Amino acid sequence: MKTTALLFAILLLSVAAPVFGQTWGQTSAPTNAWTAVASSADGTGVVAAGSHFIYTSTDYGSTWTSNNAPNIDWTSVASSADGAKLLAAGGGAVYTNSGTTWALAFAAPRDGPSTEQNITSVASSADGVTLMAASSFGDPLYSPKPLLYVSTNSGASWINATNSPPGQPWVSVVSSADGSKLAASTFTGGYFASVNSGTTWSSNTVAPFFSLASSADGGKLAGASPIGLFYSVNAGVTWAPQAGGPSITNRIACSTNGLVLFGLGRTNIYSSFNGGTTWATNTAPLTNWSAIAVSADGLRAAAAVAGGGIYVLQSPSAPALSIAPSSGAVVLSWNAPAFSLQSATNLTDTFSNVTGAISPYTNAITSPQTYFRLKGN
């Protein structure tokens, strides 16, 4: 038996195990017309925004605090990886928060006696230094064209990055972890991308993505549209529809590797742990879901209801499968009674239960190359 094969099999667990035991539970957050939710990388910090309020939690959603934000209708929120820097948009303004106080970062320009532009979506790099905001029309007669705004100094100053193609409203923006790769979509299917923090932009025509999600490196992207989910593995240069998948037409979020996806349909929450190849319907209530956020590893998530509460998901951590040499054999051990040991000669073969295997399980190294994994009963 090759030890390397065993070790590779152990790594597979981090992808396969979260499929089991997903449980969504409602938190103590108040009922509100929630429109947006964001999460820290570890899922500990959660921020939710909606009509007149922004609430935050620092304990996975167990308790919530009103964040003393200005009394406006909030449309979007974003968080740094550590949860220490928050970004929120409402009306024609963008606010930042690096502690307990919200500060006005900028207000979108307007022409004439019109209402200000509406800021529809915001995004943040992992360190909270590179920020992006997107606007739509505030008034068809007086407001300027919708713009993308970018800050590379935590919101201290902003530049007008680019207009949308023929003045169509921007609806979603995302950023890579380092803030170098930015992407934005419009209501009618215009897609813009930058690989230099917004200095220059390229564009192509895609489905009208209402929501975008990006892997940490910006290479994998998912887009939720009125005609379903699309996926890109080349930073948005080309997109492929996820044929046969669920109807994810509302919001989409993903883990940092881009393989764990959570999407909102009209009333359901769906999840995939293989980049959208297969999907599972979550055991969440059938309701009017409006926003979703996912932790870096994809094991935790938070979802908000328009006119309802906020729910959190805490998937069980992947059980550990350990290996140790023992007198011409290897011993496999695991502390997960609800999981069975399975084996296959090749990764592409069908895995089957190892008959009678209980932890610790001894396997002779004279056997052919074998891959092992744990599967929930």
Image (spheres, helix red, strand yellow):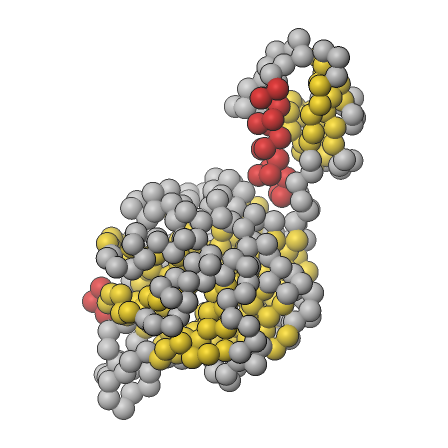
Instruction: Tell whether 95 sits left or right of 149.
Output: right
Q: Residue furthest left?
A: 166
Q: Is residue 16 above or below residue 91?
A: above
Q: Residue at x 69, y 69 (%)?
A: 63
Q: Is residue 282 above or below residue 2?
A: below
Q: Is residue 315 above or below residue 59?
A: above
Instruction: Tell whether 370 sits left or right of 79.
Output: right
Q: Residue at x 31, y 63 (%)?
A: 186
Instruction: Give the x, y percent position of residue 290.
Output: 51, 66
Instruction: Tell whether 356 sits left or right of 296.
Output: right
Q: Residue at x 68, y 60 (%)?
A: 25
Is residue 258 shown to the viewer in this render?
A: yes
Q: Nearer the viewer, residue 107 or 207?
A: 107
Q: Nearer the viewer, residue 369 or 95?
A: 95
Instruction: Tell whether 335 sits left or right of 236.
Output: right
Q: Quadrant of the C terminus?
A: top right
Q: Is residue 172 above or below residue 375?
A: below
Instruction: Give the x, y percent position of residue 221.
Output: 40, 49
Is residue 224 shown to the viewer in this render?
A: no
Instruction: Give the x, y percent position of residue 341.
Output: 70, 27
The image quadrant that residue 354 belongs to is: top right
Instruction: Give the x, y percent position of residue 3.
Output: 61, 19
